[in-house]
Image (cartoon, helix red, strand yellow):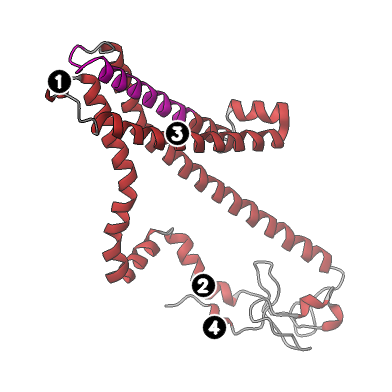
Amino acid sequence: RDSSGQRGLPGDGAAGAVGARQQRAARRLRLNAAEEGWRRILSSRTLLLITMGVYVPQIAAGIGVLATNWNDPNACDLEHLLKWRWWALVSVVRMAAFLLVMTMDHVLVDEERSPLREFVLRTGGEEQLILWHDKLARGKHLVDVLGLVWFIIGNLWVLSDDDSSPGQGKSALFILCVFFIVVYYIQICLPCAVAVAAIPVLCFCLPCLLRFMVRMQDAEAHAERRGAEEDVIDRIPIRKFASSQLSSDDDATCAICLCEYADEVRPPSDPCGVGPWHVSSEAHRRPS
């Protein structure tokens, strides 16, 4: 402390202060990384659950219908029977392959404690894990492209066949194929429908949307960003600035307004480890 009873800037303690700031910064970085990783895991897991909710019932229905109606007696003729049978079978295999690739990618990348991830890391390290992730991403993209091509073929074989008989509605294979095609149409059109429905909100009620998004944020974190309590600011120690005691030229700059300090100015000491600052503390008080 100086003669006035206030804390000074210890020259020999500059390295310790810098080290403490680095430790706090590293701790904040780890917390932010953990929070971002958890958010990414939740997003990936939610997407996987939605995909399973869409594909698993279709796969189960496809297996059941194909197992019981492989030689469907209600089919128009052998040509239509073969088209419906193989189109439904390939559709089931495609959905199962997509779900398998997506699940493996989630387990390898997002589930840090999964046995499969630990096995890959133990045998090949991070490079092998990245390589598997790239392969699975390419495989998922390939299955998507093949699914789109097979969807177009299904429209030609199932819905655009003028030679089909009026009694095709009794065929379980035909109904299964139509069901698959309708679900695929919904998957394609749903994003467009959501975008069209969002146009009135974005154009006429954007402030309401922004307010809703703010409300969705964590209330406690939002309150912390608004400023400090009165007693917290009053407890911040006042330190006398002296350029001769600086460890580097960068320390002579205010961390908030980026202005240079002058000797004998008494900036408050930031408890967060950023550095001293001389902007009026009234600007950082919590609004009443």
The residue that appears at 34% across and 63% down in the rendered structure is 212
Which residue was labeled with disc 2?
A: 227
Q: Is residue 84 magenta?
A: yes
Label 2 secondary element:
loop
The overriding secondary structure of the stretch rendered in magenta is helix
Please name whichever residue, 97 or 232, is drawn nearer the observer in this view of the structure: 97
Q: Is residue 99 above or below residue 264?
A: above
Specify the quadrant that holds the C terminus.
Answer: bottom left
Label 3 secondary element:
helix
Label 1 secondary element:
helix
Q: Could you tell me how far apart the alpha carbons at marks 1 and 4 are, in whole angstroms? A: 78 Å
Q: Could you tell me how far apart the alpha carbons at marks 2 and 1 are, in whole angstroms? A: 69 Å
Which residue was labeled with disc 3?
A: 146
Q: Nearer the viewer, mark 2 or mark 3?
A: 3
State which tag comes first along the sequence, 4 or 2. Answer: 2
State which tag comes first along the sequence, 1 or 4. Answer: 1
Q: Could you tell me how far apart the alpha carbons at marks 1 and 3 are, in whole angstroms? A: 29 Å
In which image quadrant can residue 134 be found? top right
